[in-house]
Amino acid sequence: MLDFLRKKAQSTLIQAVVVVIAVVFIFWGVGTNLGGSRSSVATVNGTEIPDTDFSRAYSQAVDGLQQQFGGKMPPGFADQLGIREQVLHRLIQAELLRQGGEEAGIKISELPVRERIAEMEVFQENGKFSLQRYKDILKQNRMTPGSFEKGLQSDLSADRVQELVGSFAVISDNAAARWQAWTDEQIKLAYVKFAPADFESKVAEDEQELAAWFEKNKEKYRSEPKVRLKYLLFNQSDDEKEVQIPEEELKAKYEQDKESYRQPEQRHARHILFRVEEGAADEVKAAQRKKAEEALAKAKAAEADFSALAKEYSDDESNKEQGGDLGFFAAGRMVPAFDQAVFSMQAGEVSGPVETEFGFHLIKLEEIRPENVRGFEQVKDNIAAGLKRQQAKALSFKRAAAAYEAVMKAGSLDKYSEQEAGKVQVAESFSRSERPQDIPADPKFLDAAFGLKKGELSSIIELREGYAVLFADDVQEPELPKLETMKDKALADWKKEKAAELAAKAATDLLAASREKQELQTPEGGTVTVTGLLKRMAPGGENAPPDQVQSDAFKLAWKEKLPAAPVQAGEAWFVYEVRERQPGEGAADEMTRQRLSASAKHDLLTAWLASLQSKAKIRISGAALRSRDDEALQ
């Protein structure tokens, strides 16, 4: 649950459109046109989307990605995923939503904003709103009352617009019943599998056909380029042994980087979740809140065991058995409402119900780990290792530069080798895919090696762990082989392809015969496999064929028993017959109705936004198109 909460809080990639729009409104107040004095990434019907809003949204998206990749993300990765375009698209949608609400006459006054703030438990003391607590919590989160209230006003407006548009999405009883019947349908299949491997023995070798096939496919047998190298290697690890860092230098480095060793305040919390699915009916939501309030009363009782209550009540299966334990985390790592509640509590305090997009939470704050700075003795070894690497790298470069100069003076690497016996290493001809073990695996080494022409000396190549100087003693260009040199492999590949053709033909012939007889026929020397009842929404089951076959079978009209064509799954072909169908009961449960309703509302809102966008005058500036990876990672 901890990782899930963190991702939901910080990754804009995995959130639904409606949720993303709400988040944008809360934090950045998109849509306030302050005039043309500041730069903007886009304008929507004349309203600017400021560059600052885009930068914040983009930074949050990249930060979410970084956390999902363990804090390390390759340069340019965000651009490859199109994060800039996605963030800009969502900001534009948020502005369209705001403008659409205005056109619909939806305006939120200051009164409901104040009422909502007063209702937020995180701002209350002894059950009443506390102005001082309100200011303190906003200050802790680097927000002002003005910006928070403006964002909340936009958020309430967005909620009202979404509610209004969603009210037109009605799921009738008949539609829900039809959906339930469709999802609950079950079928029993009989099928025959035709695997190419079963036909390889039937492929007769034909020299003439093999030669023609090889001529057509010979490009895939083209050899890799090879290079024979002579090279000098200057390993950083060799120089690290010689480096000694004085204590004074370590302390000076510590003082210089002291802020980087500062650890923010962390809090250890447990929670009990009363889950509410997205789009749940008001009655369901009210029932879950009531259950949370009843459990809260028990949790606040004297001698209450919060961990035991979590095991009994919590809907969070990921940590229920651990008593709802979320471990230690810093501010800003959870969804906002949860995060604000935890960081406004005292150790030992139980709070709730706190409402988030997951439902209602009861929270117990177990322990507060204050902000601190790691001491010199704690980080001394790490500092020493870092400085050793830096200084060793410098020494390695110094040795490489001296050797390179000596090669130039000697006139060639061979003559240098005569003067410095044993320093030049030799790698016999090799390709990228067959690298000798003593050759560095560093891509820069291989790129440099295969970028040289015969007789060419490289410059000094920087590697991850040192430096190298390379000389291409010989280069073998890629060649197209003759059939005689590749016959065994070519023959095996040709037989495999022919066997696949035979398998496909056998499947086609069996299906034709079966359709003629109106039932699945048993192939000569083959077998028919019969399944148990298979469920549409739960692939698998007794003797079940691959998912592609099951999916195809469920798409058949009820009067059809045989497919129009064999189904390919992986390398094999399948011919099947629907032997039995069992329709679903058609009685949609409350959970199904909620999901259908939520899906219909989401689809309607998306379509409405698309309609607004098609009519809108949208201008995108170049500021939104430049790469921001470096900016976001700073």
Image (tube, helix red, strand yellow):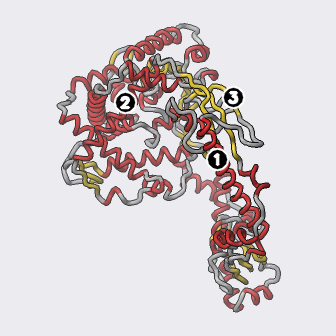
The image quarter containing residue 580 is top right
Disc on the earlier residue, 3 or 1: 1
Q: Which residue is mark 3?
A: 542
Q: Amino acid at mark 2?
A: Ala
Is 476 drawn above or below residue 164 in the view shown? below
Q: In the drawing, what numbered circle is on residue 600? A: 2
Quarter of the image for the N terminus: give it: top right
Report whether 251 appears left or right of 155.
right
Instruction: Residue at 40% x, 52% y: name it.
Output: 84
Percent from the top left, x then y, of residue 626? 38, 60
Mark 1: which secondary structure? helix
> Is residue 506 visible to the viewer in this orientation of the structure?
yes
* Label 3 to label 1: alpha-carbon separation: 27 Å
Nearer to us: label 2 or label 3? 3
**Residue in front for this viewpoint, 627 or 486:** 486
Disc on the earlier residue, 1 or 2: 1
Label 2 crowd bin: few (<14), some (14–19), many (20+), radius 10 Å: some
| Marks 1,2: beta carbons within 8 A | no
Q: Which residue is mark 1?
A: 509
